[in-house]
Amino acid sequence: MSDAPAWQGELYDLLREFDVTQFSYVPDAGHKELINRSIADPEVESVSLTTEEEGVALQAGAHLGGAKSVLLMQSSGVGNCVNFFSLIKHGRFPFLTFVSMRGDFGEGNPWQLAMGKATQPVMEDSGITCFRVETEADLIPTARAACTMAYQAEDAIAVLLTQKLLGAKAFSTGGES
């Protein structure tokens, strides 16, 4: 039995309800349940990426092959994708990503702050609509809307899973005793 919050399993079930059959990711604790369920599910392809932009290209390829895909990444990986976001925009490919945020509410790691602040503006400037989720109650309705927009209207959507939802990770500066 998983000790993950119930919403993570509900999110996986929702993605499968929308016939998502390809999950790509760079390993991340914020997506652990989705990753583990996709690996265990014999009806989907679970693809561990070397870098996040590979997932952008995989979504375009999945669409061309008639499949639905989702990219699971951390906000620090968004910067790796900027050039590939132009593929989504100019190829008019549907795109859905769930981004576990770092560098926002309660962040103690100064190295995460810059990309945490830049994630939403970078994605929006790249033509991707962003929805922020801060509470468990908002996750499934937001994810359902995102799936509908990505897979039916063929839009580019990012769901930002904030640290209010995920919880801020502890960070030690090394000077504490």
Image: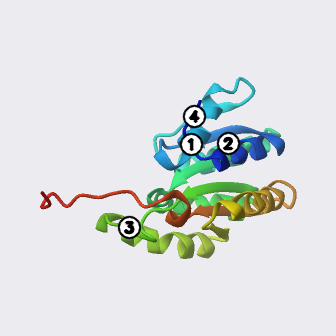
From the top left corner, tell me how far across and down residue 101 is, in percent.
50, 62
From the top left corner, tell me how far across and down residue 28 is, in percent.
47, 45
**Residue type, numbered disc 4:** Ser
Label 3 and label 1: CA atoms lie apart by 21 Å
- Position of residue 114 relative to residue 7, above or below, is below
For this view, does 28 lie left or right of residue 70?
Answer: left
- Evaluate if marks 1 and 4 touch, with contact meaning CB atoms under 8 Å apart: yes
In the image, 102 versus 164, the foreground residue is 164
**Residue type, numbered disc 1:** Ala
Report the residue at 37% width, 70% height from top. Answer: 113
Give the class, few, some or many, for how many residues have Cα within 10 Å of label 4's Cα (few <14, many ≥20): few
Count every numbered label the image shows and give the total: 4
Q: What label sits on residue 107 in the rendered view?
A: 3
Of labels 3 and 1, the one closer to you: 1
- Position of residue 122 relative to residue 151, above or below, is below
From the top left corner, tell me how far across and down residue 71 is, in percent.
62, 48
Give the class, few, some or many, for how many residues have Cα within 10 Å of label 2's Cα (few <14, many ≥20): some
- Position of residue 162 relative to residue 49, above or below, is below
Instruction: Give the structural element (helix, strand or loop) at label 3.
Output: loop
Residue labelled with disc 1: 4
- Evaluate if marks 2 and 4 touch, with contact meaning CB atoms under 8 Å apart: yes
Residue labelled with disc 2: 9
